[in-house]
Image: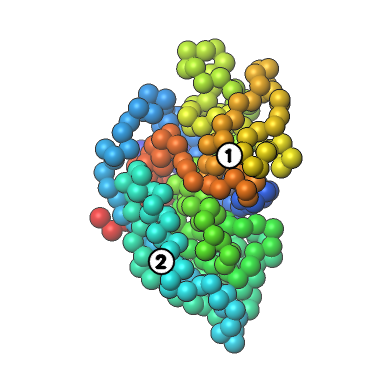
């Protein structure tokens, strides 16, 4: 069955996570992610607490300069705090992360990544050196990234990176782990040919939230916002833009605070929706490359 899903995945390869706004992030590989019937709206009533508890190992790799200086934020304390943030969020759907450890790698080359392509090169080098664990999520922390804040190598994957400042700041790590679990940005509409309708009544002829956008029906329809369209004090949208069907976008402030929405830094990210958590659990169940199974400890 996994081969069938893999085929569907490859057919659906048309996505990229754009670098923009404060939540800049990128994917090296463009595989995506629409599994027919896997995100049906009827499942939105599912109780998240009913999902079987699952625990994943997680391991952090931090780059320092070859004279063993720099990246001062890469500490045991900050790594533990980052894992705690992940657990606070993902425990809501019975996912936990177990910190296996952290390790410093001395490298002038990977201390600063100048573009997302260098992340991929870094991972190749890490693989060659045996510095990618198959039994854990691998988080790589360079001192600085140019042009992006964090990155997930693949959907359905266990390799990601954040810059040093985003090890300690909340938002980016949670966002990238969301991508690993197959979450898309809520306000990108380029994943499918049809644009996502604002309509959320499943009986409406215009309803397509389960088949377009981020494929999650309980996140509002959105589009790539310009910073000036967002009132940063109230986290509301100041725009009368309409979707392809003529409906004015309706974006609650919770949408702008969703971890997977590209908005403005003032709108602190603090939530995912039930539908997103269900999509996450579906991704873990599907696990087309067995990465999640290998990283599990229970
Ligand atoms: Zn992203």
Q: Which mark is residue 146?
A: none
Where is residue 257 shown, x and y percent of the image? 55, 42
Q: Quadrant of residue 92?
A: top left
- What residue is at 55 percent from the left and 54 percent from the top? 172
Where is residue 285 shown, x and y percent of the image? 34, 42
- What residue is at 41 percent from the left and 27 percent from the top? 40
Q: Residues within 10 Å of mark 2 (few under 14, many from 20)?
A: some
Q: Which mark is residue 80?
A: 2
Q: Residues within 10 Å of mark 1 (few under 14, many from 20)?
A: many
- What residue is at 65 percent from the left and 70 percent from the top? 112
Q: CA distance from mark 1 to mark 2?
A: 27 Å
Q: Quadrant of residue 246?
A: top right
**Nearer the observer, 148 or 274:** 274
Q: Earlier in the sequence, mark 1 or mark 2?
A: 2
**Quadrant of the rendering where the N terminus is positioned:** top left
**Quadrant of the rendering where the C terminus is positioned:** bottom left
* Left or right for 258, reference 80: right
Up/down of 286 relative to 249, above or below: below
Up/down of 187 relative to 83, above or below: above
Where is residue 82 shown, x and y percent of the image? 45, 61
Q: Secondary structure at mark 2?
A: helix
Q: Quadrant of residue 103?
A: bottom left
**Nearer the observer, 125 or 165:** 165
Up/down of 150 relative to 101, above or below: above
Q: Going by the picture, which residue comes out furthest to the front?
A: 233
- Confirm whether residue 206 shows in the render: yes
Where is residue 210 shown, x and y percent of the image? 49, 26
- Report which residue position mark 1 lands on: 256
């Amino acid at each position: 069955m996994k081969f069938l899903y893999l085929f569907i995945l490859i057919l659906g390869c048309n996505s990229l996570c754009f670098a923009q706004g404060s939540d800049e992030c990128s994917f090296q590989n463009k595989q995506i992610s629409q599994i027919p019937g896997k995100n049906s709206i009827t499942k939105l009533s599912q109780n998240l607490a009913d999902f079987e508890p699952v625990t994943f190992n997680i391991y952090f790799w931090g780059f320092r300069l070859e004279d063993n200086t720099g990246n001062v934020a890469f500490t045991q304390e900050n790594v533990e705090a980052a894992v705690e943030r992940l657990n606070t969020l993902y425990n809501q759907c019975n996912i936990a992360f177990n910190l296996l450890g952290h390790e410093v790698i001395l490298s002038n080359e990977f201390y600063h990544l100048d573009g997302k392509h260098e992340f991929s090169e870094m991972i190749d080098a890490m693989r060659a050196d045996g510095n990618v664990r198959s039994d854990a999520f691998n988080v790589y922390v360079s001192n600085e990234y140019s042009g992006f804040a964090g990155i997930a190598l693949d959907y359905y994957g266990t390799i990601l990176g954040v810059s040093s400042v985003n090890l300690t700041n909340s938002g980016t790590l949670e966002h990238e782990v969301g991508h690993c679990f197959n979450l898309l940005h809520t306000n990108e509409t380029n994943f499918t040919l049809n644009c996502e309708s604002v309509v959320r009544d499943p009986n409406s002829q215009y309803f397509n939230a389960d088949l377009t956008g981020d494929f999650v029906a309980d996140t509002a329809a959105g589009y790539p916002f310009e910073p000036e369209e967002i009132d940063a004090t109230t986290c509301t949208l100041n725009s009368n833009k309409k979707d392809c069907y003529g409906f004015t976008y309706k974006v609650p402030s919770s949408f702008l605070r969703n971890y997977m929405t590209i908005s403005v830094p003032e709108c602190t990210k603090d939530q995912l929706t039930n539908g997103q958590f269900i999509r996450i659990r579906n991704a873990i169940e599907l696990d087309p490359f067995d990465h999640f199974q290998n990283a599990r400890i229970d």
